[in-house]
Image (cartoon, grey):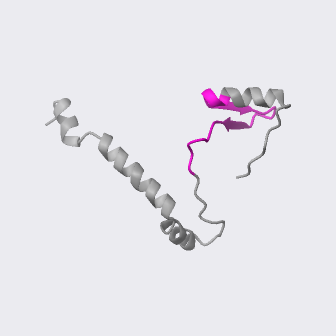
Amino acid sequence: MKTIAVSQRAKTLNALLNKARRKTIILQSADGERFALTSVNNWDGFDVGAGTDFALEVERTGKNKKLMRSLSGRRKRSQAAGIPLAAVRKQLGLG
């Protein structure tokens, strides 16, 4: 991924960026190809390398402490917000 700085003089592009701050927008080129324009302020990216050896990439990913903390936090949040299957069955009158 590459970051490109947008000049304040690029009025049209800045107008699109302002819209994307509020809601993701899809840009469609003249040839029909589509691109998503969205804010990534709260996005975490993790580089696991550009190698072709998948086993090595898996090993590196597992050693990425920042990624592992992020995944662990997501798992804890999703478990805390979940509803046990037994409770769902009871609510639906299935058991």
Q: Quadrant of residue 85?
A: top left
Q: How many marks?
A: 0
Residue 43 at x, y percent in the picture: 57, 45
Q: Nearer the viewer, residue 67 or 27?
A: 67
The question of residue 74 being in magenta is answered with no
Numbered range of the magenta stretch: 20-44
Q: Residue 20: horizontal and vertical position, in percent?
A: 66, 30
Q: Given the current orientation, which residue lies at the most extreme front position?
A: 8
Would you place residue 95 above or below residue 67 in this image? Answer: above
- Is-magenta flag for residue 25? yes
Q: Measured along the vertical axis of the image, is residue 2 above or below residue 26?
A: below
Q: Judge left or right: residue 26 versus residue 55.
A: right
Query: Measuring 30% from the left and 41% from the top, which residue is drawn there?
Result: 82
Which quarter of the rendered picture does the C terminus lie within? top left
| Closer to the camera in the image, 1 or 41 | 41
Find residue 54 and report its horizontal and vertical position in percent: 57, 69
Q: Position of residue 18 (x, y in %)?
A: 69, 28
- In the orientation shown, which residue stands out farthest toward the right? 9
Q: Quadrant of residue 7?
A: top right
The correct choice, above or below, for 15 with respect to 68 in the image is above
Q: Residue furthest left?
A: 95
In the image, taking residue 33 as reference, residue 77 lies left or right, namely: left
Q: Nearer the viewer, residue 25 or 47?
A: 47
- Quarter residue 81 falls in: top left
Residue at x 66%, y 37% (from the top left corner): 36
Q: Please give the name of the residue rendered at 37% of the width and 51% of the height, measured from the top-left corner.
A: 75
